[in-house]
């Protein structure tokens, strides 16, 4: 009701299976997903949504255990919101996720076999188009905006998610892990997105 008052058009599903059917039929702009569902749970729904495409996902749940948060992020969630939460706050988080897919400054940039086109919001590696979620794309754009510079996790939290998560860096690490799986030839030995231990991450413009 609160989201409808904010002007959103909603499709509702009571089970994970119904939600996946609605996703295919309605093609929504974003998915707000509970974890505790009858049938397949929210984690599995999240994995299937992410495997099917790049639709943004906000997890909305009463479960705030560390393991649940990490599992949700690793399953592919773009944001993780713990109940209770006011409708206008949830709506602000939804809009923040959706803004990550909006256009920014134009101009394709080439780094080795990786091409980032900021105007078209596309990324290719070895001439093959990569399907990045809005959050993964925003992360890559932020990192590549300052090649060679180390960006702290706190900076990335504020730049990509637009709030600080009270210093919780797990959401950054999970997003970087997913991003590496798509842009790196060998994600276990990344050349583009490098970890600077205890500080944060650095985008390496020349992977040689």
Image: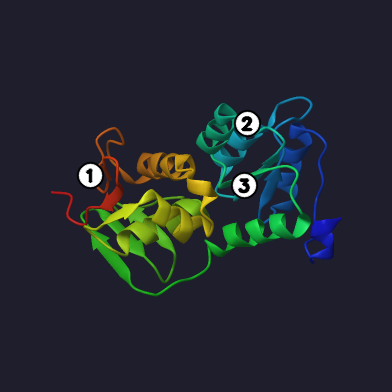
Question: What is the x, y in percent for residue 2?
Answer: 83, 57
**Who comes first in sequence, dot 2 or dot 1?**
2
Question: What is the x, y in percent for residue 179?
Answer: 40, 45
Residue indicated by mark 1:
191
Q: Which residue: 79% across, 33% down?
A: 15
Q: Is residue 110 above or below residue 186?
A: below
**Who comes first in sequence, dot 2 or dot 3?**
2
- Label count reads 3
**Pointer 2: residues within 10 angstroms few (<14), some, or many (20+)?**
many
Q: Is residue 5 above or below residue 72?
A: below
Q: Quadrant of the N terminus?
A: bottom right
Quarter location, residue 80: top right
Residue indicated by mark 3:
57
Residue indicated by mark 2:
43
Question: What is the x, y in percent for residue 82?
Answer: 68, 42
Assess whether mark 3 and mark 2 are in contact (beta carbons under 8 angstroms).
no
**Pointer 1: residues within 10 angstroms few (<14), some, or many (20+)?**
many
Quarter location, residue 16: top right
Which residue is situated farthest in the front direction here?
166
Q: Which mark is residue 38?
A: none
Q: Is residue 33 above or below residue 188?
A: below
Q: Which residue: 75% across, 40% down?
A: 19
Quarter location, residue 62: top right
Question: What is the x, y in percent for residue 107?
Answer: 34, 73
Q: Secondary structure at mark 3?
A: strand
Spatial distance from mark 2 to mark 1, Cα to Cα?
Answer: 30 Å
Q: How is the image coloured?
A: rainbow
Spatial distance from mark 2 to mark 3, Cα to Cα?
Answer: 11 Å
- Residue 91 placement, left or right of 97: right
**Pointer 3: residues within 10 angstroms few (<14), some, or many (20+)?**
many
């Amino acid at each position: 009701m609160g989201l409808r008052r904010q002007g959103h058009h909603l499709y509702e599903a009571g089970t994970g299976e119904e939600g996946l059917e609605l996703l295919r039929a309605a093609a929504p702009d974003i998915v707000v997903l509970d974890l505790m569902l009858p049938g397949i749970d929210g984690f599995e729904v999240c994995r299937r949504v992410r495997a099917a495409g790049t639709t943004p996902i906000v997890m909305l749940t009463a479960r705030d255990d560390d393991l649940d948060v990490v599992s949700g992020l690793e399953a592919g969630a773009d944001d993780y919101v713990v109940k209770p939460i006011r409708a206008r706050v949830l709506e602000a988080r939804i809009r923040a996720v959706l803004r990550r897919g909006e256009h920014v400054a134009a101009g394709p940039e080439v780094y080795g076999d990786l091409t980032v086109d900021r105007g078209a919001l596309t990324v290719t590696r070895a001439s093959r188009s990569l399907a990045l979620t809005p959050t993964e794309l925003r992360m890559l754009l932020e990192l590549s905006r300052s090649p060679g510079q180390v960006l702290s996790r706190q900076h990335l939290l504020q730049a990509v998610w637009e709030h600080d998560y009270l210093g919780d860096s797990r959401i950054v690490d999970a997003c970087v892990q997913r991003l590496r799986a798509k842009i790196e030839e060998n994600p276990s030995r990344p050349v583009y997105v490098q970890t600077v231990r205890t500080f944060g991450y650095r985008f390496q413009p020349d992977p040689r």
